[in-house]
Each structure stands twice: as structure tokens, then as C-alpha cells.
Amino acid sequence: MFRFLLKRLFVALLVALAVSSISFSLAYLSGDPAIAIAGAGGSAKDAELVRQLYGFDRPIIVQYTDWIGQALQGNLGTSYYFSMPVSQIIAERIPVTLVLGSVSFIVALLLALPLGIMAALKPNGVLDRIALLIAVSGQAVPSFWLGLILIVVFGVWWNLLPISGADSWQGFVLPVVVLSYYALPTLMRLMRASMIDVLQANYVRTARSKGLGMTTVILRHGLRNAILPLVSVAAVQLGILLSGSIVIESVFALNGLGRLAWESLLRSDLPVVQGIILILSLVYVLLTTLADLINAWLDPRIREA
């Protein structure tokens, strides 16, 4: 297990380095960042002043090593728009994104597991068809459209819930519903398919032949094996929920990282965009690494692969 842990940490470190280089290079994808910061009305002289002020006139490799060195010390630069440390701005906004993504993931998982298991017990039955309907509609309905419908129905017509802001827990209800509904189909269908495979395994048939009830067989023998493929996908889904909430945070006016990233793109505030992408990408790497370690703990064969 220790050898597997070292191997996964080494891979995670390489991925983190690749992510950091991609995050840094974003500043140059749209051309000269000095011209973008100087704005459409800026002259060549203004752009040159910006280039010297922010160090864009230095070699790119020097800029990157300086940026990554400062990032390792917790310094992600200074926002061009707010004139504040990027790390401070992210620290103020990230709680909203973490609460929104984590609660949405937990709700989706709590619904997906029992629905997937019940659908697997009787394939093509009533519950399976309901689960299929939920999965298809969840994948087909755009999240921003569902968010707008919920705002109109629950916020405008019935006035039951706030439609914007995160001043109270009620402000998270509608965004959590939208994100959970987005993540639910993948988790539920995977749980169904995995449980069907497990229920057809010989050790499950043996357990059933000994007179064990279906509930006992699922909890004692089936769930641990069926959940293995779900762990990796669940980690990816959580990463998607944390990093992909740009639209939902904008629709519900939540001051999280997603909305900050969108606003910073419009303002050409590159240090903030780079910092957000780096932080969310590292969270994504951390989640997938943890998923691999959990899988290796659940199934010893993975450690020896």
C-alpha cells in the first residue's frame, strides 16, 4: 500500500506541475497580456508601461518560475481590478463554492445509491423505468434552464425561496437542487450497472443459497464491490460540481469562485483567473488521488496492478 501511495503521489505531483504550467500559459493564449490589460483605448506606450510594470517583458520561463515559486508560498499575485492579493479574494469567495458543490454532491449521492440499487433489483421494472426517466431528463435538461424555471416557480410565483444571494441557507436550496439533478444521472446509472453485475456473481448466488435475505446480501456482500467503480466517478463528479458552477453561481447571483472567474475574465484580471484555475485544478487532482487510494484500500488487487 505504501508503494502504491508513493506512486500515486508522484503522478499527482506531475499532474499538478502540468496544471500549473497550463494555468500560467492562459495569460498568453489571447495574445499579448499587456495589450489586453491596457484596454482597447490604450496606446502602444500604455502597453509598454504595463509590460514593464507587471514584468511581461521578462522571458516567459523566468515569469513562470517566479510565479510558481510565489504560488508555493501562498502568493498568487495581485488582482489588477481589486488591487488586492488574489489569495485573499479567493479565500473570501471559496466557502460559497465549497458549500454549494459539497452539499449538491452529498444530495446527489444519497439519492443515487438507493435509486441505483432499487433499479438493479428489478431491471426493466417500474422503479428501473422511473430511474431511467430521471437519468435521461437530468442529462437532457440544461442546468441554466432548470435554474431559471425554479426561480420563476419557487421565487416569483410562490415566493417560497430567495432567488439570489447566499445570505441564508435558503439561498442555497434552488442551486443545490439544480446541481444535484445534474450529477444524479451519472451516479445512479453507474450504481445500477455495477449492482447488476455484482448480483449475478457466484458469491452472491452462494450467499442467497444459504438463505440470506436480499437486504443482508446487498449490505454485506454486494455494496462494497458495487461501489468500487463509483468511487472514481464520484470524485470526478465532485470536481465537476466544484469547478463547473460558473453558470449556476451567475444565475443565482452567488458570490463564489465560478462567478468570480467569469467576472475576472470579462475584466481581463489574469492573476485572479490563473489563481482560480490553479486552485480548482489542484482540488480536482487531490480528489482523484483520494479516489484511487480508496479504491486500492477496498480492492487489494489494485495495489498490485
Image (cartoon, rainbow, N blue to C red):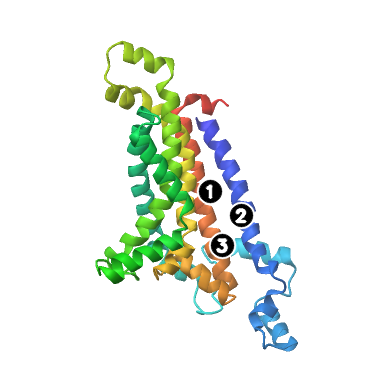
Q: Earlier in the sequence, mark 1 or mark 3?
A: 3
Give residue 155's position: percent from left, percent from top. 30, 69
Quick one: SS at disc 1?
A: helix
Observer-nearest of 259 and 73: 259
- Residue at label 1? 285
Left or right, 254 with respect to 159, comes to right
- Which residue is at 68% across, 74% downward? 33
Q: Secondary structure at mark 2?
A: helix
Q: To which quarter of the image does residue 63 belong?
A: bottom right
Label drawn at residue 19: 2
Q: Considering only order in the chain, which callout, 1 or 2, is on the residue closer to the N terminus? A: 2
**Of circles 2 and 3, which is in front?**
2
Q: In the figure, is residue 61 to the left or right of 77? A: right
Report the quarter where the C terminus lies.
Answer: top right
Query: Would residue 41 appear left or right of 84 to someone viewing this image?
Result: right
Mark 3 burial class by Cα count in 10 Å: few <14, some 14-19, many 20+ = some
Give how far apart the Cα atoms at labels 2 and 1 are: 9 Å
Position of residue 66 in the picture relative to residue 178 (left or right):
right
Displayed quadrant of residue 274: bottom right
**Distance between the alpha carbons at the discs numbered 2 and 3:** 13 Å
Q: SS for tag 3?
A: helix
Residue 77 appearing in the image: no
Q: Is residue 224 visible?
A: yes
Residue type marked 2: Val
User: Badge 3 is on which residue?
Assistant: 71
Marks 1 and 3, how far apart at CA: 17 Å
